[in-house]
Image (cartoon, rainbow, N blue to C red):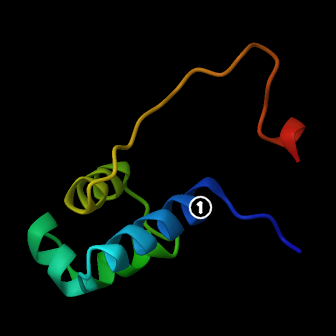
Amino acid sequence: MMRQTYSERLGAQVRAQRKLLNLTQTDVAELAGTTQRSVSQVETGKASRLELYASVCEVVGLELTAVARQRGTTDRARS
């Protein structure tokens, strides 16, 4: 099984939160000032702009943050 990328995992969280809030992709797009297609790209991890992820996350109540890891810890080491 192929491992999900960060973008794909974030997109899955966005989708789950959007559905929990009973919002459509179009609803989120309107609130974020973007298109339904862009929201779809975020949810599938295909969006290319960090700002797009951030604005969609904000609309659905998620906070996009960067957290420092312990030295020597990588994502590959956790698999």
Residue at horizontal 20 percent and vertical 60 percent from the top: 59
Q: Residue at x 43, y 61 (%)?
A: 48
Q: Position of residue 38 (x, y in %)?
A: 31, 75
SS category of the residue bearing label 1: helix
Mark 1, residues whose alpha carbon is within 10 Å: few (<14), some, or many (≥20)? some
Name the spot of residue 34 as percent of width and height, x first. Answer: 17, 72
Residue 54, x across and y down, in percent: 30, 50
Q: Quadrant of residue 2?
A: bottom right
Compared with residue 72, is residue 6 higher up or lower down, i.e. above or below? below
Q: Residue furthest top?
A: 71
Q: How many marks?
A: 1
Of residues 76 and 50, the one nearer the viewer is 76
Q: Quadrant of residue 70?
A: top right
Compared to residue 39, the image places residue 66 above or below, namely above
Q: Quadrant of the N terminus?
A: bottom right
Q: Tell me which amino acid carries mark 1.
A: Arg
Residue labelled with disc 1: 9
Q: Is residue 32 left or right of residue 64?
A: left
Describe residue 42's horizontal placement relative to residue 55 as left or right: right
Image position of 23 (left or right of 11):
left
